[in-house]
Image (cartoon, rainbow, N blue to C red):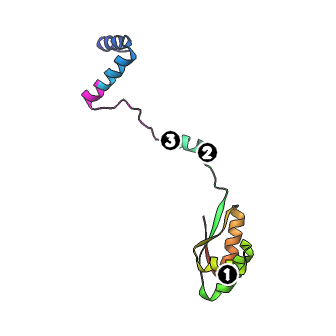
Amino acid sequence: MANEKTQQILDLVKELTILELADLVKALEAEFGVSAAPVAVAAGPGVAAAEVVEEKTEFDVELTSFEDDKKLKVIKEVKDIAGLSLGEAKELVVSAPKMVKTGIPKDEAEAIKAQLEAVGAKVTIK
């Protein structure tokens, strides 16, 4: 329960118009060096568990590099995986790092990565 002085102040505040109340808030902020802005509160462990995290569903496979002596095998694999001509596949491989496939499911991306690494390529999934 508020004391008598506090109750008198509350009664006065209740009589103010919105504009007068806004002026009062600004004056209090200036006088005491405080802000009436709401403060963000860190979420506790219970809130974090309730948040929905969007899971990534599309992945990109990037050829980052390859072993020089395995270049021809990597080119052939990229040709088959990406459905490119031999010349296009060669250009993609020699200009690495380059995307081999984009917007594919995770299991397909991992299979392609394994396939390319088996022939001497270095691959990342993004």
Q: Which quarter of the image is occupied by the N terminus?
A: top left
Asked if marks 2 and 1 touch (Cβ < 8 Å), the reply is no
Please state which amino acid type lies under the numbered disc 2.
Answer: Val
Q: Which residue is mark 3?
A: 44
Can residue 57 be spotted in the picture?
A: yes
**Residue type indicated by callout 3:** Gly
Spot the residue most to the bottom: 69
Residue stretch rendered in magenta on the structure: 27-44
Tell me which corner region of the image, top left, top right, bottom left or bottom right, holds residue 41.
Answer: top left
Question: At numbered mark 3, what does the secondary structure look like: helix, strand or loop?
Answer: loop
Residue position for label 2? 52
Check disc 1 and report its element: helix, strand or loop: helix
> Does the magenta portion include 72?
no
At which x and y percent is residue 104?
70, 62
Q: Are marks 3 and 1 in contact (CB under 8 Å)?
A: no
Earlier-in-chain disc, 3 versus 1: 3
Residue at the outermost left position: 31
Q: Amino acid at mark 1?
A: Val
User: How many residues crowd mark 2 within 10 Å: few (<14), some (14–19), many (20+)?
Assistant: few
Q: Is residue 67 left or right of residue 1?
A: right
* Labels 3 and 2: the sequence-earlier one: 3
Left or right side of 25 for 100: right
